[in-house]
């Protein structure tokens, strides 16, 4: 009997400790343009705070809908500031936690095998260079779905800015998020992709293609904003993480990954 009690006690302790560990996990819903940088940000914050992070990556719009429906996230890192703002207005975000942490940049990426070469970063001639997208040489152009991905809306805006959207809209292939959009291009399912600079700077994309940074005035600013979810059971670590994002260390990591400082 004593042996059985010992076993039951061990199982109970193991279960309780597991539940506590799970409760202490900082659950992050992060826009997919943060895929690469979270591999550096998460360990850096964990080392500093002792917290453990559980990171989910996807489109900002989809996470917004999930949080509206009660998804148990602690922090939402959006690539579109309107989603956290809407959560705050609806009372689903912790008051005062809205934090601008970065600004994303849009690039046009072409695979080495496509034969398409974008030669100029000069805004005055870039419009002429982009006309190659209207040619038969560019069969498919990947963008993130503009219905719920801010980089997709930025891509549409850039194509409209250079006056070629109507000519290429039938070539567009929509990714669920910016990471899937990059995968379409890298796998050869698209010749060209409009993706985040943070993704273009990753080793797989650098090795298989070339990218050209689009001028800031060719699309609306991609203001990336974070918020603490109102229902979070881990408010202390959530606040510490937002402070870390805007700290010198956090901003240095973000800049190295292709993000710009947020507008204050």
Image (tube, helix red, strand yellow):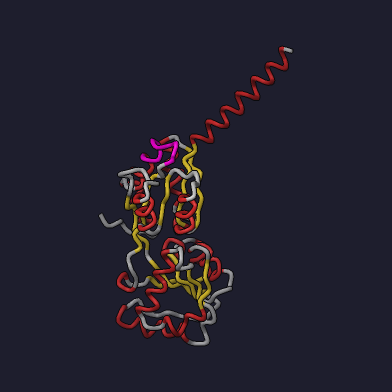
- Residue 258 picture location, percent across and down: 38, 60
Residue sitting nearer the eye, 39 or 103:
103
- Would residue 43 appear left or right of 225 to someone viewing this image? right
Q: Position of residue 1 (x, y in %)?
A: 74, 13
Q: Is residue 232 magenta?
A: yes
Q: Nearer the viewer, residue 72 or 37?
A: 72
State the extent of the magenta-drawn residues as a range.
231-239
User: Is 222 in the magenta?
Assistant: no
Q: Residue 43, position in %: x, y?
A: 46, 43
Q: Residue furthest left?
A: 264
Say whether residue 183 is left or right of residue 38. right
Hey, which residue is sitting farthest bottom in the picture? 135
In the image, residue 62 above or below residue 173: above
Q: Position of residue 125 (x, y in %)?
A: 33, 83
Can residue 232 be seen in this snapshot?
yes
| Numbered-mark total | 0
């Amino acid at each position: 009997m004593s042996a059985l009690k010992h076993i039951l006690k061990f199982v109970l302790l193991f279960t309780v400790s597991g539940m506590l560990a799970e409760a202490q996990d900082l659950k992050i819903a992060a826009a997919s343009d943060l895929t690469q940088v979270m591999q550096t940000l998460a360990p850096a914050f964990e080392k500093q705070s002792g917290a453990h992070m559980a990171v989910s990556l996807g489109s900002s719009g989809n996470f917004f809908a999930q949080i509206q429906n009660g998804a148990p996230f602690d922090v939402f890192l959006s690539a579109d500031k309107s989603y956290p703002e809407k959560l705050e207005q609806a009372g689903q975000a912790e008051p005062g936690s809205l934090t601008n942490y970065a600004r994303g940049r849009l690039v046009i990426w072409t695979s080495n095998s496509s034969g398409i070469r974008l030669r100029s970063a000069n805004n005055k001639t870039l419009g002429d260079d982009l006309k190659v997208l209207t040619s038969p040489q560019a069969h498919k152009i990947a963008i993130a779905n503009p219905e719920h991905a801010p980089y997709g809306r930025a891509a549409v805006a850039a194509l409209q800015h250079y006056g070629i959207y109507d000519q290429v809209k039938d070539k567009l292939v929509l990714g669920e998020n910016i990471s899937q959009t990059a995968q379409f291009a890298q796998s050869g399912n698209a010749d060209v992709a409009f993706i985040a600079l943070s993704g273009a700077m990753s080793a797989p994309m650098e090795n298989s293609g070339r990218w050209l940074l689009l001028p800031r005035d060719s699309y609306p600013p991609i203001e990336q904003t974070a918020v603490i979810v109102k229902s979070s059971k881990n408010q202390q670590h959530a606040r510490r993480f937002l402070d870390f994002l805007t700290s010198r260390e956090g901003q240095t990591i973000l800049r190295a990954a292709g993000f710009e400082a947020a507008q204050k």
